Image: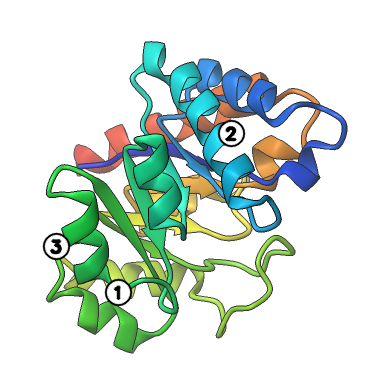
């Protein structure tokens, strides 16, 4: 089962810092999964960047997950792909990526959650938990109550994303999430290493305490 801190990249938030540097600092701070999200890069540039970051992550044992693009994930030899409801259907993505790949699926409505029960996805991305400027094309927010509701009926690993940071990540875990995914809480701060270290320690601590209950 996936647990811990999950970084979703956003190069626009990194200002003048190379994305690769921000990712490396975050991984050294404790990030367990990296999702490379690129909406503007050409396919060729996206693949080249994915290959560079994959090599960078290898010594740390951190898998690279590609957002949306199964073709880029395959070309770069990434560990997995994250798909939304309007992307390639899960069954096709699984057939192409293979049984060992990580495949995450965003759920934005209760119908999405119900349909996902028939799929062997690696995790559900509960999106968004709170309102966030990094993702505006959503159908509403889940809130902490939404996480708890999904946890009560879903057999899948749950990754919470959207407006999460050090102030509320622990609450998301207590509500039932297994992973907390962040974007600006790492990409937009001056010290990605320190931010990742704080978040990772917080999540690990709350997961541990939750497990004792």
Q: Is 99 located above or below residue 88 in the figure?
A: above
Residue at figure coordinates x 34%, y 45% from the top left: 74
Q: Secondary structure at mark 1?
A: loop
**Viewer-side residue, 141 vs 51:** 51
At horizontal 39% and vertical 50% (from top left) the residue drawn is: 173
Judge whether residue 174 can be spotted in this image: no
Is residue 137 shown left or right of residue 100? right
Q: Which residue is mark 3?
A: 120
Kind of element beneath mark 2: helix
Instruction: Return the residue nearer the eye: 92 or 147.
Output: 92
In this rendering, does residue 146 appear at all?
A: yes
Q: Which mark is residue 49?
A: 2
* Mark 3 or 2: the one toward you: 2
Q: How would you rate the neighbour count of disc 1 (Cα within 10 Å): few for under 14, some for 14-19, many for 20 or more? A: few
Q: Nearer the viewer, mark 1 or mark 3?
A: 1
User: Do the residues bearing badges 3 and 2 touch, measured as CB atoms within 8 Å?
Assistant: no
Give the spatial CA distance, label 3 vs label 2: 29 Å
Mark pair 1, 2: CA separation: 25 Å
Q: Position of residue 9 (x, y in %)?
A: 61, 43
Q: Looking at the picture, tell me which residue is in the foreground, 51 or 200.
A: 51
Question: Dot 1 corresponds to which residue?
Answer: 89
Q: CA distance from mark 1 to mark 3?
A: 12 Å
Q: Position of residue 207 (x, y in %)?
A: 32, 38
> What residue is at 45 percent from the left and 26 percent from the top?
54
């Amino acid at each position: 089962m996936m647990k811990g801190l999950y970084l979703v990249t956003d190069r626009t938030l990194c200002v003048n810092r190379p994305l690769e540097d921000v990712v490396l600092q975050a991984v050294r701070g404790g990030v367990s999964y990296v999702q490379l999200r690129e909406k503007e890069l050409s396919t060729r540039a996206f693949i080249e960047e994915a290959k560079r970051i994959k090599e960078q992550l290898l010594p740390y044992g951190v898998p690279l997950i590609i957002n949306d693009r199964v073709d880029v994930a395959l070309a770069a030899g990434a560990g997995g792909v994250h798909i939304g409801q309007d992307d390639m259907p899960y069954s096709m993505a699984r057939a192409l990526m293979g049984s060992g790949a990580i495949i995450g699926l965003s759920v934005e409505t209760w119908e999405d959650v119900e349909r996902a029960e028939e799929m062997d996805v690696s995790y559900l991305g509960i999106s968004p938990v709170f309102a966030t400027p990094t993702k505006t094309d959503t159908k509403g927010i889940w809130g902490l109550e939404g996480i708890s509701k999904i946890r009560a009926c879903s057999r899948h690993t749950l990754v919470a994303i959207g407006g999460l940071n050090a102030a509320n990540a622990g609450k998301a875990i207590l509500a039932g999430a297994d992973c907390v995914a962040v974007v600006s809480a790492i990409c937009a701060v001056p010290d990605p290493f320190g931010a990742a270290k704080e978040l990772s320690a917080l999540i690990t601590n709350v997961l541990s305490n939750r497990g004792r209950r």
